[in-house]
Every structure is written in structure tokens, then in C-alpha cells.
Image (spheres, rainbow, N blue to C red):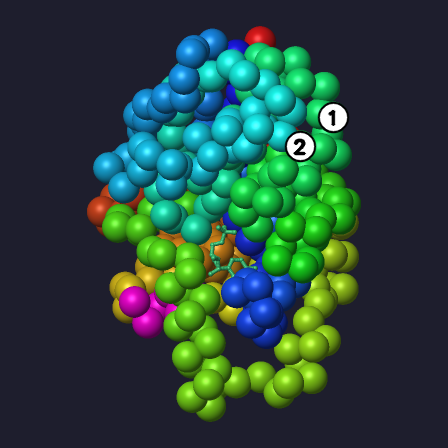
Amino acid sequence: MHVRAPGKINVYLGVGALRGDGYHSLATVFQAVSLYEDVHASPSDGFSLEVSGEVDVSGVPLDDRNLALRAAKLLAAETGVRDGVHLDIRKGVPVAGGMGGGSADAAAALVACDALWGTGIGSRGLHELAARLGADVPFALHGGTAVGTGRGDVLTPALARGRFDWVLVLGGRGLSTPEMYRRLDGLRAHGDSLADDALELLEVPVAVLQALRSGSAEELAPVMMNDLEAAAVLDRADIELVLADGVRMGALTGIVSGSGPTTAFLCGGPEAAGALRDELRASGRDALHVHGPVPGARVVD
Ligand code: C5P
């Protein structure tokens, strides 16, 4: 069983207060992009895993910290399946890059094992298990463009016309998501803080939703935002340089993707994106041209 699941960009990422459960309230817009994780699931007595890919996979855990393995075991436990599975993961999404690669693995593993075992859990059941595995896993199941609230796991589809062209610049060594959230809390505690009521009134601006609906990259560019960017930049000062380079070379705008260090540049169309990718590569950056929205985790024939 072969399932493919996409990485994501947060077109908008507003981070609110730290909640009692250790997560932050979010008002975010996800867009799934054409950079994929491929998971092949085959019958096995126990649970096992292998990981390879076009990106550096040395940081991927192969034990029970691996979200795909946890997804398979959770689905088996919840549906009374006694079989095991061997998961072969081929990664196209940068590891710890802020693009939800691990979450995509988990979503793909859920869909692949569900199909392999014929559990009959249904899409609502899968969504519920996805939310238990991690805040971004439901979106990787869902795909497309969606508003995420709660921890980012409460999804509402957003209308997005046409396609958006992005150039990604991979940031080398990954960044830890929990660490970036802690840093943001630290920055806010030291004066760079929002008023408490601003944290309470966290929501995606109407202008972001309108720009997505109209399919206009030019309208979307000026309203894109990521609260975690300040935290990522603290760790990697070169991110600011990359962002400035991308814009100077013709991007409409650039932001850090999720908790970074990947940066995402929005372009006016496929040609502009191809040209930007080439120019960034010529300057020594690891750049890719992708587009969104694309579907969530799907069985591949
Ligand atoms: O759910 P996931 O495992 O992807 O989250 C990783 C970590 O990122 C969480 O343990 C938490 O520290 C942080 N996080 C957060 N608020 C969110 C999502 C993630 O603080 N909404």
C-alpha cells in the first residue's frame, strides 16, 4: 500500500497564549504544497520502519519517537487489529524544517494502515486519531488550504482559487518546534509582548482569506505573517539575509515556514518562481519550486 502526503506552509501563523496542555492557541492558515512524503506499508508480524529520502534523514528517529510508527500502533490498538506493518518512508519534505514532514508521515501511515487492514474507522475516526498524534497531523490528512484554530488541529477548509507558486529555501540543520515556541514566549515575556486581549482575540485576518479566495498572490503577499519568525531568526541570523535576498531577486514576499528554518517565497506565477529558484541556486542556496494547494494523504495506485 503506497500513500503520499504533502508538506505544508503556514501562509499565516498567529500564535496566542500558552495553554494548560503545553500547546499554544493558534490562528493559522495551512497550505499543502507539492513536496511529498511517500509511505509504503506492507504486512508484517511486528512493527518496523525504514527511512530514506531526497533530504537528509539522519535526524529521523527509528524507534517509538517516530510519529509514523506511533500512528500505525495507535490505529491497530484503537481498532483491535493484531497484525503488524512494515513502513518504508521516502522523505521529500525537509526534516525538522517547519513544513510538517513528520506529521505528513503520520497521516500517510494512518491512511496506509487503514487501507491495508480494512479497519473501517472512517475519515472522522482517522481525523480524531490524527489530532491525538500531533497538532499538524489532521491538516496533513486533509490537505488543500485550511484555517487551523485550537492547537492548529481544528480545521475549516478555506476557499483558494487557482494555484500559488512558492520557492522554498531549505535551511540546513533543523530547528526544534517546541524550542521555537518557548523562545517566542521568552521574547514576549521580555517586553516584545502582545496585550493580553490581543492574545485572546487571535484570528486570521479577513484580508488573508479574501486574498486566498481571489487567487491573487499579489494580494496575499502583504498580509502573510508568522509569529514564530522572530524566534527562528534568533537561532539563525542568516534567515533574515535569505529573506532579503529572495525579495531582492523578485519574490513578492518571503516568510519562515512554521517553526523554520525553511523559508517560503511567494511568486507571481510559475515562470517567476522558476527564475527565482534558479537565481537562488546560482547564489548557492538550496532552493525548490513548489505549488499549492495540493490534496492531503492519498492512496497512490
Ligand atoms: O503536536 P506537535 O507534536 O507537532 O507539537 C510539537 C510541540 O510544539 C508541542 O509539544 C508544543 O511544545 C509546540 N506547539 C505549541 N502549540 C501548538 C503546536 C505545537 O506550543 N499549537
Residue 120 is covered by the magenta coloring = no
The one of 91 and 294 positioned closer to us in this rendering: 91
Residue 230 is covered by the magenta coloring = yes
Beta carbon of the mark 2 residue lies under 8 A of ligand 1 = no
The magenta stretch is 229-235
The one of 226 and 82 positioned closer to us in this rendering: 82
In the displayed structure, does residue 126 sit left or right of residue 173? right
- What SS does tag 1 mark? helix
| Image x and y of residue 15, in percent | 57, 68
Question: What distance separates the C-alpha of mark 2 from that of mark 1?
Answer: 6 Å
Q: Which mark is residue 126?
A: 2
Asked whether residue 245 appears in the rendered view, the answer is no
| Image x and y of residue 35, in percent | 47, 33
Q: Residue at x 72, y 19 (%)?
A: 120
**As drawn, 10 above or below 238:** above
Asked whether residue 37 appears in the rendered view, the answer is yes
In the displayed structure, does residue 288 sit left or right of residue 208? left
Q: Which mark is residue 122?
A: 1
**As drawn, 218 above or below 270:** below
In the displayed structure, does residue 217 sit left or right of residue 232? right
**As drawn, 248 above or below 285:** below
Q: Amino acid at mark 1?
A: Gly
**As drawn, 236 above or below 123:** below
Q: Residue at x 70, y 51 (%)?
A: 154
Q: Residues within 10 Å of mark 2 (few under 14, many from 20)?
A: many
The one of 210 and 198 positioned closer to us in this rendering: 198
| Image x and y of residue 134, in percent | 54, 47
**Do residues under tags 2 and 1 come within 8 Å of each other at their CB atoms?**
yes
- What SS does tag 2 mark? helix
Q: Amino acid at mark 2?
A: Leu
* Placement of the C terminus among the 4 image quadrants: top right
Q: Residue at x 65, y 24 (%)?
A: 79
